[in-house]
Image: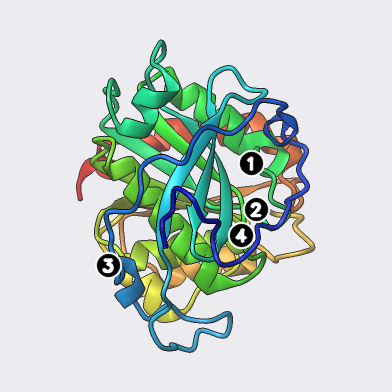
Amino acid sequence: MNPHTEPPSESPRESPSASPLYHSENPWSELLEPTLWGQETPHSDHEIPDANGKMGPPYHFQWLGTQSRRGGDARSIELRFVTSKGFLEAAFHPGTAEISDDQILEGEGLTATHGVVFAGELDGDLGGPAGIYAQASRQLQRENFAALRLGTRERGHLSHCVLDVLLGIEFLQRRGVTHIALVGHSFGGAVAMTAAAHTPEVSAVAALATQPPTIEVIQSLAGRPLLLLHGQDDDEISPLNSRYVYAMAEKPKEIVLLPNVRHDLTPARAEIVQKLAQWLQNPLCDAR
């Protein structure tokens, strides 16, 4: 299949979102950056667990190219990853101002060596819970961090979501980012930890109000900093889940329980953004 002329085998699904990026009237660019992975991608060799933690056969997935357009956030560029399994929306903060969209796609002009991938929310909102991902990305960008906020191709499907994060890691690596952290909320926390377990390139993981992944995943993060934040009044996913992950994880690890905060994290938005920004700049996150 020629990715420049034919659509992916599955039609994209529209993701409703409060993010202004989804309401851009700008046209998409031509399809650029065809895959370097080939027919058998490195990531398709992984046995990605399903939602029950059971390992299945390798899941085949190709990144065919990337399209871009300017969206509602002047500090970022809106991306659409074209894959053999549909479109994946994203917002990219390059960590460097005054560069063109073509330079971003070609990996030119960027100076950031540190970056973060935010796993997609179940509702597809690129801003993250209470807008935390968008605010943290802008704050980190001022410190010359690259940030990639992912949408969702298949909501609640662990294998798909893990592969989306692995694609995001590959995107940053091609642009010279050598220290990559992952952040996820709720189901996305389990996605972030599982993705980290499948690639040594991830230097740190932060999970907000997380669902727990398998014990094997938690233990595989040994030696990599793990940050857990959870609202004490969360009635959707009990903070006992973060306590469990913390108990099972090896050092370095940190847990912060937020009083009077529920699952959406809204009252603690500013505190969480500040904590994430400080933690991601900790030298421990560079150790891997």
Which residue is located at x 41 percent, y 63 percent?
A: 62
Give the amino acid at mark 4.
Arg
The structure's colour scheme is rainbow
Which residue is located at x 38 percent, y 33 percent?
A: 105
Badge 3 element:
helix
Task: Provide residue 129's location: percent of width, then percent of height.
Answer: 68, 44
Residue 211 lies left or right of residue 172; in this view the side is: right
Which residue is located at x 79 percent, y 62 percent?
A: 235
The reply to whether dot 1 and dot 2 touch (C-beta < 8 Å) is yes
Q: Earlier in the sequence, mark 3 or mark 4?
A: 3
Give the amino acid at mark 3.
Pro
In the image, which disc is placed on residue 121?
Answer: 2
> Which numbered disc, 4 or 2, marks the residue closer to the eye?
4
* Separation of marks 2 and 3 at Cα, in angstroms: 25 Å
Label 4 environment density (alpha carbons within 10 Å; few <14, some 14–19, many ≥20): many
The reply to whether dot 1 and dot 3 touch (C-beta < 8 Å) is no
Label 3: which residue?
42
Which quadrant would residue 95 be assigned to in this image?
Answer: top left
Badge 2 element:
loop
Q: Earlier in the sequence, mark 4 or mark 2?
A: 2
* Separation of marks 4 and 1 at Cα, in angstroms: 12 Å
Label 4: which residue?
153
Which residue is located at x 63 percent, y 26 percent?
A: 71
Give the amino acid at mark 1.
Leu
Q: Earlier in the sequence, mark 2 or mark 3?
A: 3
Label 1: which residue?
126
The answer to whether residue 115 is visible is yes
Query: Among all residues in the image, which is located at the extreme left?
Result: 287
Badge 4 element:
loop
Q: Earlier in the sequence, mark 1 or mark 2?
A: 2
* Separation of marks 4 and 2 at Cα, in angstroms: 10 Å
Residue 248 lies left or right of residue 45; in this view the side is: right
